[in-house]
Amino acid sequence: MTPTAIVLMAHGSRNAAANDDLAALAERIRDSGRYAPVVASYLELAQPDIKTACRECVAAGAKRIILSPYFLSAGVHIRRDLTHIRGQLAQEHSDVQFTLAEPLGPHPLLMDILLHRADEASHSTAAGR
């Protein structure tokens, strides 16, 4: 079986704590055992950047890499930046398949998540929440 990696891609933040969610998600996916390796990466402002994360996966033997955007919509970062990076990686590693997954927003389960968060907020007793 060909090893398939996932590279989670977020915008990135100068605030390191803001990047922790993606790193924790990568760890949970990795722990599920469905994909290996699983790496969190960032478009800018944090490390590793997307290309570095993908190169780590190639070095680990991945022959297929799913580029999974941690973005809500297919805005300029998906349509231009991430598509461009995918193309560069495919040229650099012609023996590896790079697939850009869809952003999170169009997925029907996102409504369930939003309603869950709304329910949490409506039952919150904390002032200002």
Image (cartoon, grey):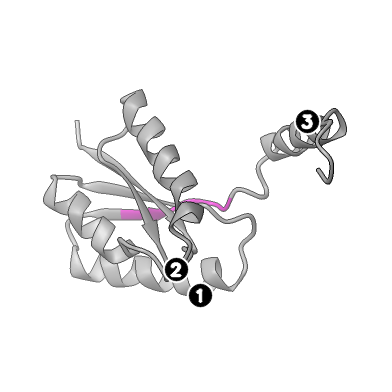
Residue type of the residue flagged with mark 3: Glu
| The N terminus: image quadrant | top left
Q: Quadrant of residue 73?
A: bottom right
Quarter of the picture containing the C terminus is top right
Q: In the displayed structure, would residue 18 be above or below residue 83?
A: above
The residue segment tinted magenta is 98-103
Q: Are marks 3 and 2 in contact (CB under 8 Å)?
A: no
Q: Which residue is mark 3?
A: 120
Mark identifier at residue 40: none
Residue 126 x %, y %: 80, 36
Q: Circle 1 sits on which residue? A: 80
Three-letter residue code for mark 2: Thr
- Please report contact status of discs 1 and 2: CB closer than 8 Å, yes or no: yes
Instruction: Pick whichever, 84 or 123, lies toward us.
Output: 123
User: Which residue is situated farthest in the front direction here?
Assistant: 127
Identify the mark nearer the N-term, 3 or 2. Answer: 2
Say whether residue 128 is left or right of residue 31.
right
Q: Report which residue position mark 2 lands on.
A: 83
